Image (spheres, rainbow, N blue to C red):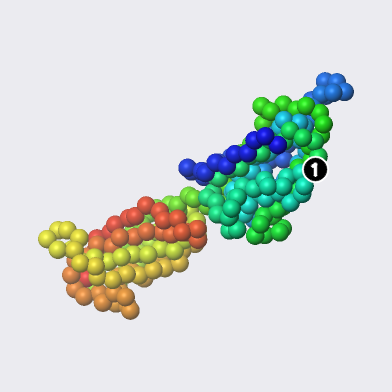
C-alpha cells in the first residue's frame, strides 16, 4: 500500500452511478480488474466487493444524504488505513473523496467506525494492473440541490377587503409556499406586517390570501407580498413580489 488521498469537495459531485467492469483478455498474464469508484450513502457502499490488480486504486465518494462514515481498515492487510485518522466521529461533506492504491495482493476489509453495516472488501490479485484506467463514472450525489420553480403567481384581485382574495400559483415539485407582508410607505417596502404559509402540490394551486388571520391583521393600507417556495430538501426558489391594497 503506497498511496492514500483524501479530498474535500468544493461542490457536490455530479454524474450517473453505474456498475461496469471492463475485462481485457490479451494473454494469460494480462490484467483483468480495474480501478473502481465507490459511492458511500444510504448507509452502504454502492459496490460492497471489489476486485483489483496490482497498482490499481479505489476512490470512495461521500454521496449522502448520510455522510458521517469512515473507510477504516479492519484486517491485518489494511491495519492503520483510515479516511479519518485520529477522529472517532467521521465528518464529511458531499463530494469528499478518499483514494487508496493497492500494491500487494490479498483481501482488504473496511468498515465505518460508527456504522458497522457501512463496509466492504477489496480483493487484489497478483497480476500487474493499469493504474490509469477508470471504468466507473463519478457516483451521483443522493440529495436534492435544485430549488423549486414558481410560475403564474397571480392574485384574483389587487384590492380587496379584510376577507382577502385568492392567490394562484404553479410549482414543479411538492413545496411549501410562504408570503411575508410588508407595508408600502412612500412607494417603498416598509415595516413587516405579517405572514401566511400554504402547502403546495405539483401543478397549479390556489389558497386564501391577504385576509385577517393569526399572523396578519389585514388593516387598510397598501402592501407588498414577498412570496417563495421551499421544497422538502429546504431548497428555496426565486422570490416573487406582488403588490396589493386592503380597503
Question: Which residue is pictured at 45% across the width and 55% down the height?
Answer: 235
Total residue callouts: 1
Which is more toward the observer, 59 or 101?
101
The residue beneath circle 1 is 107
Among all residues in the image, which is located at the extreme top?
Answer: 26
Residue 127: which quarter of the image? top right
Q: Name the residue: 67% across, 59% down.
A: 115
Residue 243, above or below 4: below
Whether residue 157 appears in this view of the structure is: no
Image position of 81 (left or right of 199): right
Q: Tell me: 193 left or right of 89.
A: left
Q: Position of residue 62 (x, y in %)?
A: 59, 48
- Residue 33 at x, y = what percent? 77, 32
Q: Quadrant of residue 18?
A: top right
- Which residue occupies 61% across, 42% down? 98
Q: Is residue 161 above or below residue 35?
A: below
Crowd around label 1: few <14 · some 14–19 · many ≥20 (10 Å): some
Task: Please give the name of the residue rendered at 67% of the width and 45% of the height, measured from the top-left corner.
Answer: 81
Residue 208: quarter of image: bottom left
Q: Position of residue 245 (x, y in %)?
A: 21, 67
Amino acid at each position: 500500500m503506497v498511496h492514500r488521498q483524501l479530498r474535500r469537495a468544493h461542490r457536490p459531485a455530479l454524474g450517473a452511478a453505474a456498475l461496469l467492469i471492463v475485462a481485457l483478455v490479451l494473454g494469460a498474464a494480462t490484467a483483468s480488474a480495474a480501478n473502481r469508484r465507490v459511492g458511500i450513502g444510504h448507509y452502504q457502499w454502492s459496490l460492497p466487493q471489489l476486485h483489483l490488480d496490482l497498482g490499481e486504486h479505489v476512490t470512495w465518494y461521500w454521496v449522502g444524504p448520510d455522510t458521517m462514515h469512515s473507510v477504516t481498515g479492519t484486517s491485518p492487510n489494511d491495519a492503520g488505513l483510515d479516511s479519518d485518522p485520529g477522529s472517532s466521529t467521521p465528518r464529511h461533506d458531499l463530494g469528499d473523496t478518499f483514494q487508496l492504491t493497492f500494491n500487494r495482493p490479498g483481501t482488504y476489509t473496511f468498515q465505518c467506525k460508527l456504522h458497522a453495516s457501512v463496509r466492504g472488501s477489496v480483493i487484489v490479485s497478483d497480476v500487474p494492473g493499469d493504474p490509469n484506467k477508470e471504468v466507473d463514472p463519478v457516483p451521483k450525489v443522493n440529495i436534492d440541490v435544485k430549488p423549486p420553480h414558481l410560475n403564474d403567481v397571480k392574485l384574483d384581485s389587487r384590492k380587496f377587503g379584510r376577507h382577502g382574495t385568492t392567490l394562484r400559483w404553479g410549482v414543479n415539485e411538492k413545496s411549501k409556499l410562504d408570503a411575508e407582508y410588508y407595508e408600502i410607505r412612500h412607494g417603498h417596502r416598509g415595516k413587516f406586517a405579517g405572514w401566511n404559509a400554504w402547502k403546495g402540490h405539483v401543478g397549479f394551486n390556489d389558497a386564501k390570501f391577504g385576509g385577517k388571520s393569526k399572523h396578519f391583521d389585514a388593516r387598510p393600507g397598501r402592501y407588498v407580498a414577498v412570496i417563495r417556495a421551499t421544497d422538502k430538501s429546504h431548497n428555496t426558489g426565486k422570490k416573487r413580489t406582488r403588490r396589493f391594497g386592503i380597503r
